[in-house]
Protein backbone atom coordinates (compact mmCIF):
# COMPACT_ATOMS: atom_id res chain seq x y z
CA UNK A 1 0.00 0.00 0.00
CA UNK A 2 1.60 3.21 -1.19
CA UNK A 3 0.97 6.39 0.81
CA UNK A 4 2.41 9.53 -0.75
CA UNK A 5 3.03 12.35 1.75
CA UNK A 6 3.49 15.97 0.69
CA UNK A 7 5.39 18.47 2.86
CA UNK A 8 6.93 21.86 2.16
CA UNK A 9 7.09 24.26 5.10
CA UNK A 10 8.43 24.18 8.67
CA UNK A 11 5.16 23.21 10.40
CA UNK A 12 4.58 20.43 7.84
CA UNK A 13 7.82 18.70 8.81
CA UNK A 14 6.76 18.57 12.47
CA UNK A 15 3.34 17.14 11.52
CA UNK A 16 4.62 14.50 9.12
CA UNK A 17 7.41 13.15 11.37
CA UNK A 18 5.23 11.00 13.66
CA UNK A 19 3.07 9.87 10.72
CA UNK A 20 6.04 8.59 8.71
CA UNK A 21 7.39 6.92 11.81
CA UNK A 22 4.06 5.16 12.34
CA UNK A 23 3.74 4.19 8.65
CA UNK A 24 7.19 2.60 8.76
CA UNK A 25 6.06 0.31 11.60
CA UNK A 26 3.73 -1.43 9.15
CA UNK A 27 5.53 -3.59 6.56
CA UNK A 28 2.49 -3.47 4.26
CA UNK A 29 2.86 0.33 3.90
CA UNK A 30 5.35 1.98 1.55
CA UNK A 31 5.51 5.63 2.55
CA UNK A 32 6.72 8.01 -0.15
CA UNK A 33 7.84 11.48 0.95
CA UNK A 34 7.73 14.51 -1.35
CA UNK A 35 9.34 17.79 -0.21
CA UNK A 36 8.11 20.69 -2.32
CA UNK A 37 10.95 23.00 -1.26
CA UNK A 38 8.61 25.82 -0.18
CA UNK A 39 10.97 26.24 2.77
CA UNK A 40 14.58 25.58 1.89
CA UNK A 41 17.04 27.25 4.32
CA UNK A 42 18.86 24.78 6.57
CA UNK A 43 17.30 26.36 9.67
CA UNK A 44 13.77 26.26 8.20
CA UNK A 45 13.92 22.79 6.63
CA UNK A 46 17.01 20.52 6.86
CA UNK A 47 17.43 20.95 10.61
CA UNK A 48 13.88 19.65 11.14
CA UNK A 49 14.55 16.48 9.16
CA UNK A 50 17.54 15.88 11.41
CA UNK A 51 15.90 16.83 14.72
CA UNK A 52 12.74 14.84 14.00
CA UNK A 53 14.55 11.90 12.37
CA UNK A 54 12.52 12.22 9.17
CA UNK A 55 13.97 10.08 6.36
CA UNK A 56 15.34 11.88 3.32
CA UNK A 57 12.56 12.80 0.90
CA UNK A 58 12.07 10.46 -2.06
CA UNK A 59 11.39 13.50 -4.24
CA UNK A 60 12.53 17.13 -3.92
CA UNK A 61 10.52 19.55 -6.05
CA UNK A 62 12.74 22.57 -5.36
CA UNK A 63 9.92 25.08 -5.74
CA UNK A 64 11.29 27.78 -3.41
CA UNK A 65 9.88 31.23 -2.75
CA UNK A 66 7.39 33.11 -4.90
CA UNK A 67 3.89 34.54 -5.02
CA UNK A 68 0.96 32.40 -3.92
CA UNK A 69 -0.01 31.57 -7.51
CA UNK A 70 3.58 30.79 -8.46
CA UNK A 71 4.18 28.50 -5.49
CA UNK A 72 0.85 26.70 -5.85
CA UNK A 73 1.21 26.23 -9.60
CA UNK A 74 4.82 25.06 -9.43
CA UNK A 75 4.03 22.48 -6.76
CA UNK A 76 1.13 21.17 -8.86
CA UNK A 77 3.15 21.06 -12.08
CA UNK A 78 6.12 19.32 -10.49
CA UNK A 79 4.06 16.91 -8.38
CA UNK A 80 1.69 15.74 -11.13
CA UNK A 81 4.14 13.46 -13.00
CA UNK A 82 5.24 11.87 -9.72
CA UNK A 83 1.64 11.14 -8.78
CA UNK A 84 0.97 9.70 -12.23
CA UNK A 85 3.99 7.44 -12.01
CA UNK A 86 3.56 6.31 -8.41
CA UNK A 87 -0.27 6.01 -8.39
CA UNK A 88 -0.45 5.88 -4.56
CA UNK A 89 -3.59 4.56 -2.88
CA UNK A 90 -3.80 7.79 -0.92
CA UNK A 91 -2.07 11.17 -0.79
CA UNK A 92 -1.61 12.65 2.69
CA UNK A 93 -1.37 16.43 3.11
CA UNK A 94 -0.89 18.19 6.45
CA UNK A 95 -1.70 21.67 7.76
CA UNK A 96 -2.63 24.75 5.79
CA UNK A 97 0.30 26.03 3.75
CA UNK A 98 0.43 26.53 -0.02
CA UNK A 99 2.12 23.13 -0.47
CA UNK A 100 -0.81 21.50 1.37
CA UNK A 101 -3.43 22.98 -0.94
CA UNK A 102 -1.37 22.41 -4.10
CA UNK A 103 -0.70 18.77 -3.17
CA UNK A 104 -4.37 18.13 -2.46
CA UNK A 105 -5.52 19.77 -5.71
CA UNK A 106 -2.99 17.96 -7.90
CA UNK A 107 -3.99 14.61 -6.39
CA UNK A 108 -7.74 15.21 -6.51
CA UNK A 109 -7.54 16.20 -10.19
CA UNK A 110 -5.96 12.81 -10.89
CA UNK A 111 -8.83 11.11 -9.02
CA UNK A 112 -6.48 10.00 -6.26
CA UNK A 113 -7.80 9.77 -2.70
CA UNK A 114 -6.69 12.65 -0.50
CA UNK A 115 -6.41 12.61 3.29
CA UNK A 116 -6.06 15.95 5.08
CA UNK A 117 -4.45 15.96 8.50
CA UNK A 118 -5.59 18.96 10.60
CA UNK A 119 -8.85 19.34 8.72
CA UNK A 120 -11.73 21.64 9.60
CA UNK A 121 -9.82 24.41 11.39
CA UNK A 122 -11.34 27.78 10.51
CA UNK A 123 -10.41 31.33 11.49
CA UNK A 124 -13.34 32.60 9.36
CA UNK A 125 -10.94 35.27 8.11
CA UNK A 126 -10.31 34.94 4.39
CA UNK A 127 -7.68 37.68 4.46
CA UNK A 128 -5.40 34.98 5.88
CA UNK A 129 -3.85 32.98 3.04
CA UNK A 130 -4.01 29.87 5.22
CA UNK A 131 -7.81 30.11 5.54
CA UNK A 132 -8.19 29.80 1.77
CA UNK A 133 -5.80 26.84 1.81
CA UNK A 134 -7.85 25.16 4.55
CA UNK A 135 -11.18 25.61 2.81
CA UNK A 136 -9.90 24.43 -0.59
CA UNK A 137 -7.96 21.48 0.83
CA UNK A 138 -10.92 20.24 2.86
CA UNK A 139 -13.26 20.64 -0.12
CA UNK A 140 -11.21 18.24 -2.28
CA UNK A 141 -10.22 15.76 0.45
CA UNK A 142 -11.85 12.36 0.88
CA UNK A 143 -10.75 11.75 4.45
CA UNK A 144 -10.65 14.58 6.97
CA UNK A 145 -8.64 14.08 10.15
CA UNK A 146 -9.57 16.68 12.77
CA UNK A 147 -7.24 17.68 15.60
CA UNK A 148 -9.90 19.30 17.76
CA UNK A 149 -13.65 19.26 18.17
CA UNK A 150 -14.15 22.62 16.40
CA UNK A 151 -12.74 21.04 13.24
CA UNK A 152 -15.46 18.37 13.28
CA UNK A 153 -18.17 20.96 13.91
CA UNK A 154 -16.96 23.26 11.14
CA UNK A 155 -16.87 20.44 8.59
CA UNK A 156 -20.34 19.24 9.54
CA UNK A 157 -21.64 22.82 9.26
CA UNK A 158 -20.17 22.94 5.74
CA UNK A 159 -22.11 19.82 4.82
CA UNK A 160 -19.24 17.31 4.76
CA UNK A 161 -20.72 13.81 5.19
CA UNK A 162 -19.90 12.49 8.67
CA UNK A 163 -18.36 9.26 7.32
CA UNK A 164 -15.48 11.31 5.88
CA UNK A 165 -14.61 12.98 9.21
CA UNK A 166 -12.41 11.43 11.92
CA UNK A 167 -11.54 13.10 15.20
CA UNK A 168 -8.04 11.73 15.84
CA UNK A 169 -6.15 14.29 17.95
CA UNK A 170 -3.10 16.37 17.17
CA UNK A 171 0.01 15.08 15.37
CA UNK A 172 1.92 18.22 16.45
CA UNK A 173 1.57 16.98 20.03
CA UNK A 174 2.68 13.48 18.97
CA UNK A 175 5.96 15.07 17.82
CA UNK A 176 6.31 17.04 21.03
CA UNK A 177 5.86 13.92 23.15
CA UNK A 178 7.85 11.53 20.97
CA UNK A 179 10.91 13.76 20.96
CA UNK A 180 10.64 14.75 24.64
CA UNK A 181 13.59 12.66 25.78
CA UNK A 182 15.75 14.40 23.16
CA UNK A 183 14.64 18.03 23.56
CA UNK A 184 14.94 17.81 27.32
CA UNK A 185 18.70 17.37 26.77
CA UNK A 186 19.09 20.51 24.61
CA UNK A 187 21.81 22.90 25.78
CA UNK A 188 20.06 26.00 24.41
CA UNK A 189 19.65 27.66 27.83
CA UNK A 190 23.38 27.47 28.52
CA UNK A 191 24.22 28.58 25.01
CA UNK A 192 22.00 31.65 25.28
CA UNK A 193 22.66 32.23 28.98
CA UNK A 194 18.95 32.17 29.81
CA UNK A 195 17.75 31.14 33.28
CA UNK A 196 14.91 28.61 33.02
CA UNK A 197 11.51 30.14 33.79
CA UNK A 198 12.78 33.72 33.59
CA UNK A 199 12.47 34.79 29.97
CA UNK A 200 9.80 35.27 27.34
CA UNK A 201 9.75 34.18 23.69
CA UNK A 202 8.50 36.14 20.69
CA UNK A 203 7.72 34.70 17.26
CA UNK A 204 6.14 36.66 14.42
CA UNK A 205 5.58 35.79 10.79
CA UNK A 206 1.95 36.33 9.77
CA UNK A 207 1.77 38.68 6.76
CA UNK A 208 -0.91 40.77 8.58
CA UNK A 209 1.61 41.47 11.37
CA UNK A 210 4.96 41.71 9.62
CA UNK A 211 4.27 42.94 6.07
CA UNK A 212 2.72 46.21 7.28
CA UNK A 213 5.47 48.45 8.73
CA UNK A 214 3.14 50.29 11.15
CA UNK A 215 1.72 47.10 12.66
CA UNK A 216 5.21 45.64 12.96
CA UNK A 217 6.51 48.80 14.64
CA UNK A 218 3.59 48.83 17.11
CA UNK A 219 4.17 45.19 18.04
CA UNK A 220 7.88 45.72 18.53
CA UNK A 221 7.33 48.76 20.71
CA UNK A 222 4.99 46.73 22.98
CA UNK A 223 7.48 43.88 23.16
CA UNK A 224 10.25 46.39 23.87
CA UNK A 225 8.28 47.63 26.92
CA UNK A 226 7.78 44.09 28.20
CA UNK A 227 11.46 43.34 27.60
CA UNK A 228 12.31 46.07 30.15
CA UNK A 229 10.89 43.64 32.74
CA UNK A 230 12.21 40.28 31.49
CA UNK A 231 14.51 39.20 28.64
CA UNK A 232 12.70 38.19 25.46
CA UNK A 233 14.29 35.97 22.86
CA UNK A 234 13.08 36.41 19.29
CA UNK A 235 13.94 33.67 16.76
CA UNK A 236 13.33 35.62 13.58
CA UNK A 237 11.45 33.99 10.68
CA UNK A 238 12.99 34.81 7.25
CA UNK A 239 9.87 36.68 6.11
CA UNK A 240 10.09 38.86 9.21
CA UNK A 241 13.81 39.36 8.88
CA UNK A 242 13.31 40.66 5.36
CA UNK A 243 10.73 43.19 6.59
CA UNK A 244 12.84 44.26 9.58
CA UNK A 245 15.76 44.91 7.27
CA UNK A 246 13.58 46.87 4.84
CA UNK A 247 12.17 48.93 7.73
CA UNK A 248 15.72 49.65 8.89
CA UNK A 249 15.05 48.30 12.41
CA UNK A 250 18.61 48.82 13.58
CA UNK A 251 17.65 48.89 17.24
CA UNK A 252 17.16 45.12 17.10
CA UNK A 253 20.25 43.27 18.01
CA UNK A 254 20.98 40.03 16.18
CA UNK A 255 23.02 37.47 18.07
CA UNK A 256 24.49 34.18 17.15
CA UNK A 257 23.26 31.23 19.20
CA UNK A 258 26.47 31.28 21.21
CA UNK A 259 26.27 34.81 22.56
CA UNK A 260 24.88 35.16 26.07
CA UNK A 261 21.58 36.98 26.57
CA UNK A 262 21.43 40.28 28.41
CA UNK A 263 19.54 40.46 31.72
CA UNK A 264 16.67 42.17 30.00
CA UNK A 265 15.80 43.44 26.56
CA UNK A 266 14.67 41.96 23.27
CA UNK A 267 17.28 40.02 21.38
CA UNK A 268 17.05 38.28 18.05
CA UNK A 269 18.46 34.92 17.04
CA UNK A 270 18.12 33.01 13.77
CA UNK A 271 15.25 30.48 13.56
CA UNK A 272 15.93 27.66 16.03
CA UNK A 273 15.90 23.94 15.37
CA UNK A 274 12.96 21.95 16.71
CA UNK A 275 14.70 20.40 19.73
CA UNK A 276 16.19 23.69 20.89
CA UNK A 277 12.92 25.49 20.34
CA UNK A 278 10.87 22.95 22.30
CA UNK A 279 13.35 23.13 25.19
CA UNK A 280 13.15 26.92 25.17
CA UNK A 281 9.35 26.89 24.94
CA UNK A 282 8.89 24.39 27.78
CA UNK A 283 10.73 26.64 30.28
CA UNK A 284 9.50 30.03 29.08
CA UNK A 285 7.61 32.36 31.43
CA UNK A 286 5.33 33.25 28.51
CA UNK A 287 5.21 33.35 24.75
CA UNK A 288 4.10 36.13 22.42
CA UNK A 289 3.27 34.71 19.01
CA UNK A 290 1.18 34.72 15.87
CA UNK A 291 2.06 31.11 15.04
CA UNK A 292 -0.58 28.41 14.74
CA UNK A 293 1.56 25.56 16.02
CA UNK A 294 2.93 27.46 19.00
CA UNK A 295 -0.60 28.13 20.31
CA UNK A 296 -1.00 24.35 20.47
CA UNK A 297 2.42 23.54 21.91
CA UNK A 298 2.09 26.11 24.72
CA UNK A 299 -1.31 24.62 25.58
CA UNK A 300 0.22 21.13 25.78
CA UNK A 301 3.14 22.42 27.88
CA UNK A 302 1.08 24.70 30.15
CA UNK A 303 3.02 27.83 29.15
CA UNK A 304 1.02 31.10 28.99
CA UNK A 305 0.56 32.17 25.36
CA UNK A 306 -0.41 35.62 24.14
CA UNK A 307 -1.56 35.35 20.56
CA UNK A 308 -0.98 38.54 18.61
CA UNK A 309 -4.10 38.10 16.47
CA UNK A 310 -7.81 38.84 16.76
CA UNK A 311 -8.94 35.33 15.94
CA UNK A 312 -7.74 31.76 16.08
CA UNK A 313 -8.58 28.68 14.04
CA UNK A 314 -7.59 26.66 17.13
CA UNK A 315 -10.24 27.68 19.71
CA UNK A 316 -9.54 24.67 21.94
CA UNK A 317 -6.27 26.35 22.93
CA UNK A 318 -8.36 29.15 24.46
CA UNK A 319 -11.18 27.04 25.95
CA UNK A 320 -8.93 24.31 27.38
CA UNK A 321 -5.42 25.68 27.14
CA UNK A 322 -3.23 28.63 28.03
CA UNK A 323 -3.92 30.77 24.98
CA UNK A 324 -5.29 34.33 25.04
CA UNK A 325 -6.06 36.38 21.97
CA UNK A 326 -4.55 39.76 22.75
CA UNK A 327 -4.71 41.31 19.28
CA UNK A 328 -2.16 43.84 18.09
CA UNK A 329 -2.83 46.90 20.23
CA UNK A 330 0.42 47.70 22.10
CA UNK A 331 -1.37 48.73 25.33
CA UNK A 332 -3.40 45.52 25.50
CA UNK A 333 -0.30 43.40 24.90
CA UNK A 334 1.75 45.09 27.62
CA UNK A 335 -1.16 44.88 30.10
CA UNK A 336 -1.63 41.16 29.51
CA UNK A 337 2.10 40.46 29.86
CA UNK A 338 2.16 42.35 33.17
CA UNK A 339 -0.84 40.33 34.35
CA UNK A 340 0.90 37.06 33.48
CA UNK A 341 4.09 38.12 35.26
CA UNK A 342 2.07 38.77 38.43
CA UNK A 343 0.13 35.47 38.26
CA UNK A 344 1.19 32.04 39.42
CA UNK A 345 1.69 29.44 36.68
CA UNK A 346 -1.32 27.33 35.83
CA UNK A 347 -1.35 23.60 35.22
CA UNK A 348 -1.66 22.24 31.71
CA UNK A 349 -5.01 20.67 30.81
CA UNK A 350 -4.55 18.92 27.48
CA UNK A 351 -7.50 19.04 25.07
CA UNK A 352 -9.26 15.78 24.21
CA UNK A 353 -7.10 13.26 22.30
CA UNK A 354 -3.92 15.38 22.49
CA UNK A 355 -2.29 12.31 23.94
CA UNK A 356 0.56 11.48 21.56
CA UNK A 357 -1.43 8.83 19.69
CA UNK A 358 -2.98 10.78 16.82
CA UNK A 359 -0.62 9.31 14.20
CA UNK A 360 -1.45 5.78 15.28
CA UNK A 361 -5.18 6.50 14.90
CA UNK A 362 -4.63 8.05 11.48
CA UNK A 363 -2.53 5.20 10.13
CA UNK A 364 -4.97 2.61 11.49
CA UNK A 365 -7.82 4.35 9.67
CA UNK A 366 -5.81 4.55 6.44
CA UNK A 367 -4.93 0.84 6.67
CA UNK A 368 -8.52 -0.03 7.31
CA UNK A 369 -9.70 2.00 4.34
CA UNK A 370 -7.03 1.33 1.73
CA UNK A 371 -5.16 -1.86 2.45
CA UNK A 372 -6.42 -4.77 0.40
CA UNK A 373 -6.66 -7.65 2.78
C1 LIG B 1 4.51 29.85 5.20
C2 LIG B 1 3.02 29.52 5.19
C3 LIG B 1 2.42 29.83 6.55
C4 LIG B 1 3.18 29.14 7.66
C5 LIG B 1 4.66 29.48 7.55
C6 LIG B 1 5.41 28.66 8.57
C7 LIG B 1 1.77 29.81 3.07
C8 LIG B 1 0.86 30.69 2.33
N1 LIG B 1 2.30 30.32 4.20
O1 LIG B 1 4.63 31.25 5.39
O2 LIG B 1 1.07 29.39 6.58
O3 LIG B 1 2.67 29.57 8.90
O4 LIG B 1 5.15 29.14 6.25
O5 LIG B 1 6.67 29.18 8.85
O6 LIG B 1 2.00 28.70 2.66
N2 LIG B 1 12.12 32.33 3.06
C9 LIG B 1 13.45 32.14 3.16
N3 LIG B 1 13.93 30.89 3.42
C10 LIG B 1 13.10 29.82 3.56
C11 LIG B 1 11.73 30.02 3.44
C12 LIG B 1 11.24 31.29 3.19
O7 LIG B 1 14.26 33.07 3.03
O8 LIG B 1 13.59 28.70 3.81
C13 LIG B 1 11.62 33.71 2.81
C14 LIG B 1 11.46 34.04 1.33
O9 LIG B 1 11.82 35.35 1.16
C15 LIG B 1 9.96 33.94 1.12
C16 LIG B 1 9.40 34.33 2.49
O10 LIG B 1 10.35 33.87 3.43
O11 LIG B 1 9.51 34.77 0.11
C17 LIG B 1 8.06 33.72 2.78
O12 LIG B 1 8.07 32.31 2.60
P1 LIG B 1 6.71 31.53 2.23
O13 LIG B 1 6.92 30.08 2.32
O14 LIG B 1 6.12 32.06 0.99
O15 LIG B 1 5.72 32.00 3.35
P2 LIG B 1 5.93 32.01 4.91
O16 LIG B 1 5.76 33.41 5.40
O17 LIG B 1 7.16 31.27 5.28
N1 LIG C 1 9.56 26.46 15.54
C1 LIG C 1 10.91 26.10 15.68
N2 LIG C 1 11.85 27.08 15.70
C2 LIG C 1 11.54 28.39 15.64
C3 LIG C 1 10.17 28.76 15.52
C4 LIG C 1 9.20 27.76 15.47
O1 LIG C 1 11.22 24.91 15.77
O2 LIG C 1 12.44 29.23 15.68
C5 LIG C 1 8.56 25.38 15.43
C6 LIG C 1 7.47 25.41 16.49
O3 LIG C 1 7.35 24.09 16.95
C7 LIG C 1 6.23 25.80 15.73
C8 LIG C 1 6.51 25.28 14.35
O4 LIG C 1 7.91 25.48 14.19
O5 LIG C 1 5.08 25.20 16.25
C9 LIG C 1 5.70 25.91 13.24
O6 LIG C 1 6.13 27.15 13.07
P1 LIG C 1 5.51 28.40 12.40
O7 LIG C 1 5.15 29.31 13.50
O8 LIG C 1 6.51 28.82 11.42
O9 LIG C 1 4.21 27.95 11.56
P2 LIG C 1 2.65 27.92 11.85
O10 LIG C 1 2.41 26.90 12.89
O11 LIG C 1 2.19 29.28 12.23
O12 LIG C 1 2.06 27.53 10.54
Image: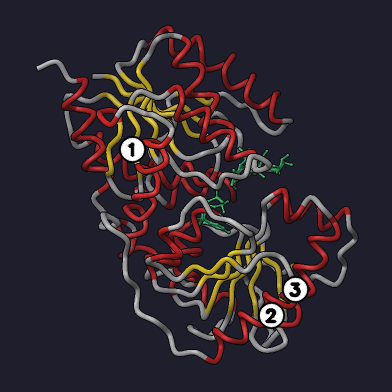
Q: Is residue 92 left or right of residue 263?
A: left
Disc nearer the start of the sequence (1/2): 1
CA gap between label 1 and label 2 equals: 37 Å
Q: Residue at x 45, y 61 (%)?
A: 275
Locate residue 104, reporting x and y percent. Answer: 47, 23
Question: Which residue was labeled with disc 2?
Answer: 334
Q: Secondary structure at mark 1?
A: strand
How busy is the neighbourhood of tag 2: few (under 14 within 10 Å), some, or many (20 plus)?
Answer: many
Q: Residue at x 35, y 79 (%)?
A: 347
CA gap between label 3 and label 2 equals: 6 Å
CB-based contact (under 8 Å), mark 3 and mark 1: no
**Ligand 1: image quarter:** top right
Quarter placement of the C terminus = top left
Q: Is residue 119 above or below residue 52?
A: above
Question: Which residue was labeled with disc 1?
Answer: 145
CB-based contact (under 8 Å), mark 3 and mark 2: yes
Amino acid sequence: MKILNVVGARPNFIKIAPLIREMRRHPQITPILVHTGQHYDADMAGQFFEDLEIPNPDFQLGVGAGSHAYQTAEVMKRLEPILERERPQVVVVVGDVNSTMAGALAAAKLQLSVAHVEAGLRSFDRSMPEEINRVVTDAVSDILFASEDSGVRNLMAEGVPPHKIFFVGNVMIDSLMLSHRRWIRSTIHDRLGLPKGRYGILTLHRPANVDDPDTLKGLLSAVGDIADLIPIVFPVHPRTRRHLETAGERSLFFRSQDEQAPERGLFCVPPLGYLDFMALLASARFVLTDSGGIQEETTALGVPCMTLRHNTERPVTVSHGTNRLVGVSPDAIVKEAERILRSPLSNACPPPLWDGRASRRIVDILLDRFHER
